[in-house]
Image: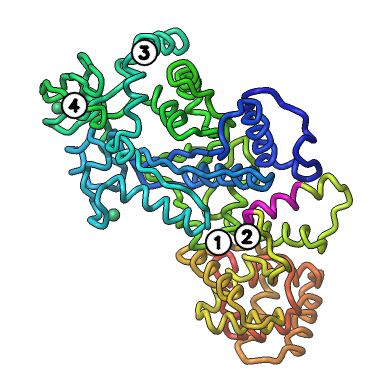
Amino acid sequence: MAWKGKRGDKEAFGGGCKMIFWADKLADEVIKREERLKRVKNLRVESGIGASGIPHLGSASDVARGWAVCLGIRDRGYDSDLIAFSDDRDGLRKVPLGFPESLKEYIGKPVSHIPDPFGCHESYGEHMSSLLLESLEKLGIDFKFYSGDRFYAKGELDREIGLALKEAERIKKVVEDWLGQDLRTVFFPICQSCGRIYTTRVTGWEPGKVFYVCDQEFEGKVSGKPFMVKGCGYQGECSFRDGKLAWKVEFAARWSRLKVCSEAYGKDLADSVRVNDWVSKNVFGWEPPLHARYELFLQKGGKKISKSVGNAITPQDWLRCGSPQSLNLLFFKRFTGTREIDLNSVPAYMDEVDWLEDVYFGREKIQNERELQHPKRLFEYIHYLKPPKKPGIHLPYLMLANILRMVPDLELAKKIVMELKGLDETEELEKRLRWAKNWVGERKAERPEIKPEELPALSELAEWLEKERDAEEIQGKVFELARKHGLKPSEFFQKLYLILLGSPYGPRMGKLIQLLGCKRVAEKLRESGPAGI
Ligand SMILES: [Zn+2]
Ligand SMILES: [Zn+2]
């Protein structure tokens, strides 16, 4: 984590496990800094929301982590709100893969001024941001939503736009000196004639009004290929409410206007944040918020998750297969470093939530007190600091997934699990089965490796199971076959559990096979061989 400002006295705001977790550390830093600055009562945390493409896990993670800091601040007795600010006045730069190519006529226009290609929302931008908002609501995150488009239209940033235009030369010089970049303009008017925003150039301004000409060009992308967009040549004037600040200035304007005390950012924005910090302090008179730099998520295989490349898993995808807590765990477990993520990670995160719960309720022993504190606090955070009072049911995810592969009927699978685990019918059980069923979906089962010497025993067991047998009989038969074929019984049992449940252990074998149904198990055993047995 990259810290801005100095690390202070670690025990100042409660010690113990509250000092080990990153969100607690950040909350302490924010509080200490704001007390020193003596400026606001509500310590606001901001998170930006992209509205140009389908939101992926990384987008939801930004907001969820902001929420964690907010919770940490509240936990220390201070007020804190989370602001989710939609970048829906951004111009569309690319047509995302999988979207109609006809969208290219809108490249360069603000995403909130483009019709929704799916027809269900007011605009393209609203469609995209509402997908993210929906997942944040599913997670139970409490946030205040701002639409950038409406924010500008209402004149909320008029003061900041005036100041930025006044100080434009100083700002451009900072950008040039620090980054070696040419900041063409601090403000982009929306062309009244063609509706584009990145093709305009400011030629002059007076309070509340900007003069511009639409004569610039910029490179967009369609289906991954460059697509040049040219200005229409229109000359005109517009109010401060009909345009948008450049990125090197807009963060600062929002921080100053909304009195933001903390905003985390990804590594790719580091330069922009540096300039914005300077602008915030020197142009708008707002000491910039405390920043932390977070990790980026990668798709398995090392590709950066990109909103426009279309390789992204959405939060909705995850929440169809796993609990909100498992997704929070993914977001909160670590703050730095890079992680590879796809839906194959769901079972591990679901099981880890169960493990954390065991640690939290003292069912899992950890000797070292310090090692115990982090998982305990992590467990509290994945429940937004309102952990359950008592432990819930725990079921290995892959066990459920494997049972559902063999017994796709949810009701029947539920009965089997209840019988196997001695559980009552509960909502929690129902949810877990549904998540696992969705996850199994089209996914192919991973086949455990079968050794050649195991094949005859598996084949004979499969044949013997063609008739219905009772639990005790089955238990005895498995032992008998292991010995007959020169296999270690413990290893043969493990292999059977792997085939049937996806884990090397399980309930008593005879009962398991009887509950799953002998014929079904026979079929499963046959499928498990290299080319079937
Ligand atoms: Zn829509
Ligand atoms: Zn134009």
Helix, strand or loop under label 4: strand
Q: Residue at x 42, y 50 (%)?
A: 132
Please identify, in this view, whether the residue under mark 4 or under mark 1 is nearer the observer.
4
Please identify, in this view, whether the residue under mark 3 or under mark 1 is nearer the observer.
3
Q: Are marks 3 and 2 in contact (CB under 8 Å)?
A: no
Decide: few, some or many residues near mark 3? Use Cα within 10 Å; few <14, some 14-19, many ≥20. some
Residue 434: x and y in percent read 52, 71
Residue 54: x and y in percent read 37, 47
- Ligand 2 within 8 Å of disc 4? The answer is no
Quadrant where ligand 1 appears:
bottom left
Residue 257: x and y in percent read 43, 31
- What label sits on residue 238 in the rendered view? 4
How many marks the image carries: the answer is 4
Q: Amino acid at mark 3?
A: Glu
The residue that label 1 is drawn on is 322
- What label sits on residue 14 in the rendered view? none
Foreground residue, 372 or 460?
Answer: 372
Q: Amino acid at mark 1?
A: Gly
Decide: few, some or many residues near mark 4? Use Cα within 10 Å; few <14, some 14-19, many ≥20. some
The answer to whether residue 503 is above or below residue 284 is: below
Query: Taking the image as drawn, is residue 300 in sight?
Result: no
Q: Mainly helix, strand or loop, the magenta region?
A: helix
Q: Which one is earlier in the sequence, the residue at label 2 or at label 4?
A: 4
The answer to whether residue 249 is above or below residue 138 is: above
Please identify, in this view, whether the residue under mark 2 or under mark 4 is nearer the observer.
4
Q: Quadrant of the C terminus?
A: bottom right
Q: How far apart are labels 4 and 1 at the CA level?
A: 49 Å
